[in-house]
Amino acid sequence: MTSPLPAGYRPYEYEDPFEDLVGPFGYKVEDGRICFAFQADERHRNTGGTLHGGILMTFADFALCLTAVWDQPGERCVTVSCHNEFVAAGMPGDLIEASGEVVRRTRSLAFVRGQLVAGGRVLLTYSGIVKRLPGASTPPRDA
């Protein structure tokens, strides 16, 4: 069972078998900023019936990395660190959205922070560092 991407979102074009397994995760660019979303379903719940922390941390890592590189043509990255703080529980059926911002870029690193929300409620905040890597893939730059 795989939920479709929410309206207006599309897949990011690169290969990641794990994200393909637990997603799909999508993105869109509005007003010069990238944001992300996925539709939570029953695959994403824990034994308590709420969303498993692992899916939220996976989605935060997805948002962290793509926030860091989407506007850097030809660049890829790998996560060096990702810190997550759980704020509220999400539920299967929730539309989970993520936003983030680059706090600082150096020649080799990017520092990013952001949050995951559902229905206006903050579920998780994240911050992290990614290692910047030159690459052949060109990130989307469209609006």
Image (spheres, rainbow, N blue to C red):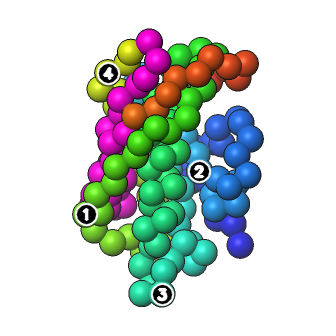
| First in residue order: circle 3 vs circle 4 | 3
Label 3 – label 2 distance at C-alpha: 23 Å
Nearer the observer, disc 4 or disc 2?
Answer: 4
For badge 2, the amino acid type reads: Phe
| First in residue order: circle 4 vs circle 2 | 2
Stretch of the chain drawn in magenta: 107-128
- Residue at the disc numbered 2: 25
Label 1 – label 2 distance at C-alpha: 21 Å
Image height of 136 relative to 36, above or below = above
Label 4 – label 1 distance at C-alpha: 25 Å
Residue located at (70% from left, 23% from top): 137
- Residue at the disc numbered 4: 104
| First in residue order: circle 1 vs circle 2 | 2
For badge 1, the amino acid type reads: Val
Asked if residue 77 shows in the view, the reply is yes
> Contact (CB < 8 A) between labels 4 and 2?
no
Label 1 – label 3 distance at C-alpha: 19 Å
Q: Residues within 10 Å of mark 3 (few under 14, many from 20)?
A: few
| First in residue order: circle 4 vs circle 1 | 1
Q: Position of residue 34 (x, y in %)?
A: 46, 32
Element type at mark 1? loop
> Contact (CB < 8 A) between labels 3 and 4?
no
Nearer the observer, disc 4 or disc 1?
Answer: 4
Image height of 9 relative to 5, above or below = above
- Residue at the disc numbered 1: 87
